[in-house]
Image (tube, rainbow, N blue to C red):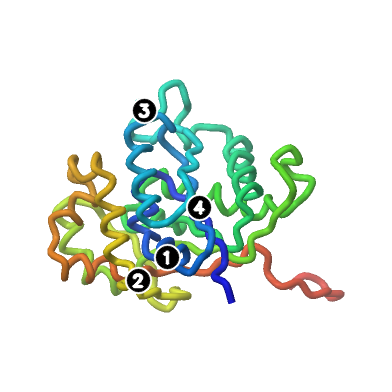
Amino acid sequence: MPAPSLLTVFAHPHDESLSAGGVLARHAAAGARTAVVTATWAPQSPRAAELAEALRILGADKPRLLGYADSRVPESAPGRPRFRDAPLDETVGALVAQIRDIRPEIVVTHDAYGGLTGHEDHVHTHRVTLLAVHAAGLERLYPHAGEPWQPSALYLATHPHSAVRTWGGHLARTGKAMHTVPDDSITVAVDVTPWLEQKVAAVLAHRTEVRRGAVPGLIAALTVAERERLLGTEWYIRHDPVPPVSTQTEPLS
């Protein structure tokens, strides 16, 4: 049985490699089509070129950038609004067009906290993606964005509370708080160690982030064993876009 096609939607270049690089590489190795939509940064920016290299390493399609500005880096997309400030209907419609064009069976995005760091762009990407995945299957919504397509599953990239033991010492030095979920909220924990070399190479392809000491820079300074401990498992919460329907004649309850 072929692996299902996979689309990830993340806020910034490098989020895809850190949060879902192993799953992207795993699906690509199994012959599935994999694609990545990134909400921020202009397609002509150096960060976009680094993203292209990371996706090549992971076996994914070429980058698809919505081209909005990073909320903390206005020069990331000159002349464009911050992703968080753009009209919601506009951003949802832009992502619906991508979903209908790619027609993935599975979509992956940030969890409701915006991942470990809780970055405001991550949180907004989560909200926009949930709306877009639902809208993509409805023919009367965004009729000019392509033929309707309903992904069969939506997964939220996350970290359980137990990951604090692994990540805590590394993020503590950055002063970042960690946003995690109860361990029993995790739907699936994916062992991505067979694809860890690709995942790490993709993370390090984001050289701008390595140089400025962001999380890819932390990864660059780790030993092989430490990288495996931090990046060898990816956790996801399944969030079905369209739950099973049953006809109900009783009042709502």
Residue identified by numbered label 2? 192
Q: Nearer the viewer, mark 4 or mark 3?
A: 4
Label 1: element kind: helix
Distance, label 3 to label 1, CA atoms, is: 31 Å
Q: Which residue is identified by label 4?
A: 35
Write the residue at 74% across / 44% down.
141
Q: Quadrant of the C terminus?
A: bottom right
Q: Are marks 2 and 3 in contact (CB under 8 Å)?
A: no
Residue 62 vs residue 170, the one in the foreground: 62
89 in relation to 112, above or below: above
- Name the amino acid type tagged 1: Val
Task: Indicate the amino acid at tag 3.
Answer: Pro
Q: Earlier in the sequence, mark 4 or mark 1?
A: 1
Q: Nearer the viewer, residue 253 or 13?
A: 13
186 and 197: which one is in front? 197
Secondary structure found at label 4: strand
Pointers 1 and 2 in contact (C-beta within 8 Å): yes
Q: Are marks 3 and 1 in contact (CB under 8 Å)?
A: no
Callouts 4 and 3 close, C-beta under 8 Å: no
Say which residue label 1 marks. Answer: 23
Helix, strand or loop at disc 3?
helix
Q: CA distance from mark 4 to mark 3?
A: 26 Å
Numbered circle sitting on residue 141: none
* Mark linked to residue 74: 3
Q: Cβ–Cβ below 8 Å for labels 4 and 2? A: no
